[in-house]
Every structure is written in C-alpha cells, then in structure tokens.
Image: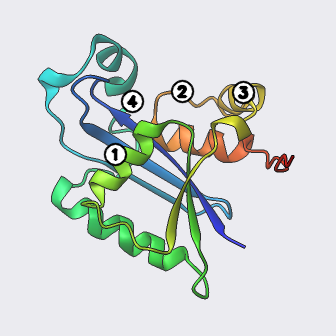
Amino acid sequence: MARKIFIDTEFTDFLDCHLISLGMVAETGEEFYMEVPYPDAACSAFVREAVIPLLGSIEDAHCPFEELKHRILNWLILIRHDGEIVEICFDFQTDWDLFNDAMDYQVPDWCCPRLIARNINELLRYSFHKKNKLPEHHALYDARANRYAFRERQSVTS
C-alpha cells in the first residue's frame, strides 16, 4: 500500500505562474512547508490580497529556490518506510506541475502523482479551516485540510 502525501501550493498567477509556497502533509501527520522567493510583479491582485499576507507565519520556512529540491527529497526519504511507494496527492493540476518544477523534473520513481479532487469532501475541508481557525490560501493549511477532507472512493468498474 502506498503512503499518501497531500500537497498544496500557492503561486503568483495562473498566467505567469511562479511558486510562492509549498506545503506537504503525510497521512500519518508529518509536515513540510517552505516559502521561496517569487517575482512580486507577477502576483495577481487576488494573490496580493489573500496569499501574501499569510506568508511568514511559520518560523524558518524561507528557502532559496535552488535548495528546495534537496529539502523536499530529504523530507520524503525521511518519512518513507521500507521502500514503499509514495502517492503525491493534489487537488489541482498546477500543484503537481509546481512540485515537479521544484524537483527540477527529477521526481523519484517511487513517487506517483495522484489527482484527488473528486476524493475531497468540500464540507469537511471548509469545516477544517473554520474549526481550526486557519485561513484558506496558505499551502500548509490547505494541505492539512485536504488530508482531513480526503475520502477514498471505490473504483467503478463496468
């Protein structure tokens, strides 16, 4: 059985897309969060209003982009057990694209992408943020919310 890692990213804009922050939460609770330098001019008005004010709230989260791949890989190796497969679970394709970019397109072969948008219970995700008084549009908080709201669905076969 694969170990699930729930990821979320924040980024500058849909058209001029640069990573701002990356949050990962293992199904067993371990967490990873980093904020990287980004081109301020590329930020949309929404990002300036909803995302940027939330940055800096987690101590020691700043990371040069060049070090991000190394830090991600070290964390994944640390939490992976006995050669298991790791599912990188995301609810939005851009999260995977930015993760892949952060890994310099050298994601280990034991990491498999998994789109989980249809497995997220939106009411549970909303209640997670409200109950924990954590704002949306923060990569770590949103990754935590996805972990909380994830529900496995049975495959439908014909």
Give residue 118's position: percent from left, percent from top.
70, 36
- Residue at 21 percent of width and 63 percent of height: 67
- The image quadrant that residue 29 belongs to is bottom right
Residue of label 3: 122
Q: Earlier in the sequence, mark 3 or mark 2?
A: 3
Disc 4 to disc 1, how far (Cα)? 19 Å
Q: Nearer the viewer, mark 4 or mark 1?
A: 1
Report crowding for label 1: few under 14, some 14 to 19, many 20 or more residues within 10 A (C-alpha): many
Q: Amino acid at mark 2?
A: Pro
Residue 46 badge:
none
Q: Nearer the viewer, mark 1 or mark 3?
A: 1
Give residue 121's position: percent from left, percent from top.
76, 32
- Is disc 3 placed on a helix, strand or loop? helix
Report crowding for label 3: few under 14, some 14 to 19, many 20 or more residues within 10 A (C-alpha): some
Residue 98 badge:
1
- Is disc 2 placed on a helix, strand or loop? loop
Disc 3 to disc 4, how far (Cα)? 22 Å
Q: Amino acid at mark 3?
A: Glu
The answer to the question of whether label 3 and label 2 lie on touching residues, with beta carbons closer than 8 A, is: no
Q: Earlier in the sequence, mark 1 or mark 3?
A: 1
Q: Nearer the viewer, mark 3 or mark 4?
A: 3
Q: Is 65 drawn above or below residue 79 in the view shown?
A: above
- The reply to whether residue 88 is in sight is yes
- The image quadrant that residue 150 belongs to is top right
Q: Amino acid at mark 4?
A: Leu
Give residue 122's position: percent from left, percent from top.
72, 27
